[in-house]
Structure formats: C-alpha cells, structure tokens
C-alpha cells in the first residue's frame, strides 16, 4: 500500500551564511546533502540506487523549470502549499550515492524564518516527502518501485535523535534549540511593533 514517506537528515550547509553567498536577487544560498541511496536511514528505511536515481532524474526536470519548491515543516498534504513555501532547489547533482542540492532561501514569511534560523546557527533538517510502499528486506524496510518523490522540506527535528549540528561555543540541548527557535520566530513576527503572539 502506498503511503506518504518522509525521510529527514540533519542539513549541514557546506557554505556558511557568514560567507554571504547569495543569488542575483540577494537571497541566501545554502548547499548540502539531500538524500542518500542504499544506506539505512533513521527511520530504518533504505532507498535502492535505481529507484532514487530515477526519481532524482525526474525531479531535476522540476528544478530546471524553477518549480522545485519546499515548505518550512511537513504538511500532511501531498501538494506543496504555496503560502508555506520557504525555499527552492536551484540545482542537484550526485556525489557517489549522495544527492547534493543547492537551495535558495526565498524572501517569503517562512523563508525569512528559515534564513534567521541559519543566521543564528540553529540546526534544521532537510526532509524528502514522497509517496510509495515499503517491503521488509532483512533488517531494513526497502522503498519499492512505486515510490514518487514529491519535494524537499526543511524541518526542526531530524529522524536521528541527537544528530544536531552544534552552534559554535554553545551547549546544545533540545530545550535550548526550542527556546532559541521560539525567540527568533517571535522577533520576526513582532518586528513592526505588532505582535500576533500572546
């Protein structure tokens, strides 16, 4: 039976926000690992190379058409909700069995929150969203041939507990992450002396 498959990895930008790499429009650009084939992930799932390669090749066409959008946090939907879009993927390529992506953070409300999180060294996860079925093969759940990649979203919690990127000179706990994230979001939403948060 096909179901929504969500796979999350900690996103470690290769280009630091401090280096100031931006798009021609001045938007922040980050890059890192999006997916990995033939490796058991934190959910106990594994993507065969042939299936992931097929879906990445299809998704690269969406990238070329400038439509590879993603949201901040996963919705329950199979459709990308435009009001929650935070970023778009500008380029993808293979590095061995890893799928690398170049991501532009858009100046949308969700994108501004994501940019502030990066600026403050708050770790986030990059998460694929797709539809497909699973089959138990040995100790892993193997993704089957009916898999369809839908998009990549940014999320707060990676599927591997404790696999966070630590900010410099700071002890990182789940409580610190929540408090810092909450503070950043409140600052953004209340920046014009009008605060919708109580």
Image (cartoon, grey):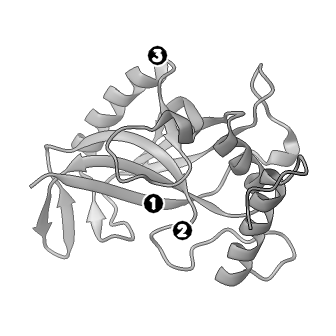
Which quarter of the rendering shows the N terminus?
bottom left
Q: Earlier in the sequence, mark 1 or mark 3?
A: 1
SS for dot 3? loop
Instruction: Tell me, for residue 65, which label it has, or none.
Output: 3
Q: Residue furthest top?
A: 65
Examine the rendering and report whether any part of residue 198 can be seen. Answer: yes
Q: Which residue is at the front of the view, 39 or 178?
A: 178
Toward the right, the furthest residue is 193
Q: Say the numbered circle drawn on residue 187.
A: none
Horizontal relation, residue 142 to residue 178: left or right: left
Residue 66 coordinates in the image, percent (x, y): 51, 20
Q: In this view, does 197 lie to the left or right of 194?
A: left
- Alpha-carbon distance for marks 2 and 1? 8 Å
Local crowd size for mark 2, using a 10 Å CA cut-off: few (<14), some (14–19), many (≥20):
many
Residue placed under numbered mark 1 in the picture? 8
* Pointers 2 and 1 in contact (C-beta within 8 Å): yes
In the depicted structure, whether residue 147 falls above or below residue 197: above
Alpha carbon separation for disc pair 2 and 3: 30 Å
Reading the image, the residue beneath label 2 is 157
Where's residue 75, x and y in %?
A: 42, 52
């Amino acid at each position: 039976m096909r179901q929504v498959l969500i796979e999350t990895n900690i996103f470690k930008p290769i280009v630091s926000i401090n280096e100031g790499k931006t798009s021609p429009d001045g938007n922040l650009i980050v890059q890192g690992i999006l997916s990995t084939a033939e490796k058991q992930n934190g959910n106990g799932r594994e993507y065969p190379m042939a299936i992931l390669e097929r879906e990445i090749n299809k998704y690269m066409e969406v990238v070329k058409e400038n439509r590879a959008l993603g949201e901040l946090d996963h919705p329950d939907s199979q459709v990308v909700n435009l009001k929650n879009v935070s970023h778009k993927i500008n380029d993808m390529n293979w590095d061995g069995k890893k799928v690398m992506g170049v991501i532009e953070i858009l100046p949308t409300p969700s994108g501004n929150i994501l940019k502030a999180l990066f600026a403050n060294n708050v770790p986030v996860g990059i998460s694929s969203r797709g539809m497909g079925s699973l089959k138990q093969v040995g100790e892993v759940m193997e993704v089957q041939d009916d898999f369809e990649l839908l998009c990549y979203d940014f999320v707060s919690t990676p599927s591997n507990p404790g696999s966070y990127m630590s900010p410099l000179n700071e002890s990182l706990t789940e409580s610190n992450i929540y408090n810092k994230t909450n503070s950043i979001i409140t600052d953004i939403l209340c920046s014009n002396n009008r605060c919708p948060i109580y």
